[in-house]
Amino acid sequence: MPARGRARAGRSSARGPPPPRPSQEPETCPSRPSPPPAGKKAKKEKKHVVHGIAHVHASFNNTHVTITDLEGNVVTWSSAGTLGFKGSRKGTPFAAQQAASAAATAAKESGLRSLDIRVKGPGSGRESAIRALQAAGVEIKSIRDVTPIPHNGCRPPKRRRV
């Protein structure tokens, strides 16, 4: 019976460090900004967006509100869980309202004035999130339901017996 600790044939157990690779770029690249000094974080550039899209994903357990520009780049986002709601309280309409208003106020700081709203999911926070976005002082251009509906695709989960 072979010993367990021995190296296999053909493999060296004491492999040294890999040889140094030649650098592809010059030491200073004019197109890239230099990294911030140690201990300081680079300040994020604020996006200035006038018209955006609010994606409201309302599941049974949580509500996510993401505000993007027209290309789909995220401006700001919020969810019931990030605001401190835990467990089943995340799925409530009040939590969805708080998440939507937090996302809207953060988006207004970056210059947002008007929104298209796209709602997805069967959760109870759908309507309250829309109402909170309207109450935040942002002009609502349109509201669309983009919940995916199967054309007889996967079998749904079995019914709960409570």
Image (cartoon, helix red, strand yellow):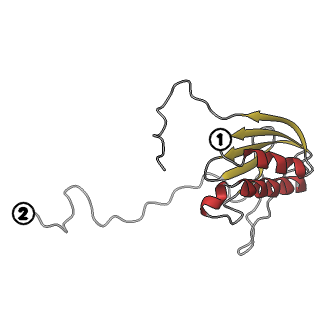
Q: Above or below — where is 147 with respect to 25?
A: above
Q: Nearer the viewer, mark 1 or mark 2?
A: 1
* Near-viewer residue (58 or 20): 58
Q: Which residue is located at x 66 percent, y 46 percent?
A: 123
Task: Tell me if mark 1 has few (under 14), some (14-19) or many (20+) residues whose alpha carbon lies within 10 angstroms of its own.
Answer: some
Q: Are marks 1 and 2 in contact (CB under 8 Å)?
A: no
Q: Residue furthest bottom?
A: 39
Mark 2 — residue? 1
Q: Quadrant of residue 90?
A: bottom right
Residue 13's x, y, as percent?
Answer: 27, 65
| Amino acid type of the residue that numbered disc 1 sits on in the rendered structure | Gly
* Near-viewer residue (93 or 35): 93
Q: Residue 121's mark? A: 1
* Near-viewer residue (112 or 80): 80
Q: Is residue 46 visible?
A: no
SS under mark 1: loop
Q: Earlier in the sequence, mark 1 or mark 2?
A: 2
Residue 39's x, y, as percent?
Answer: 71, 75
Q: Quadrant of the N terminus?
A: bottom left
Task: Tell me if mark 2 has few (under 14), some (14-19) or many (20+) residues whose alpha carbon lies within 10 angstroms of its own.
Answer: few
Q: Which residue is located at x 27 percent, y 61 percent?
A: 12
Disc 1 and disc 2: Cα gap in Å?
60 Å
| Amino acid type of the residue that numbered disc 2 sits on in the rendered structure | Met
Q: Is residue 8 visible?
A: yes
Q: Which residue is located at x 63 percent, y 64 percent?
A: 86
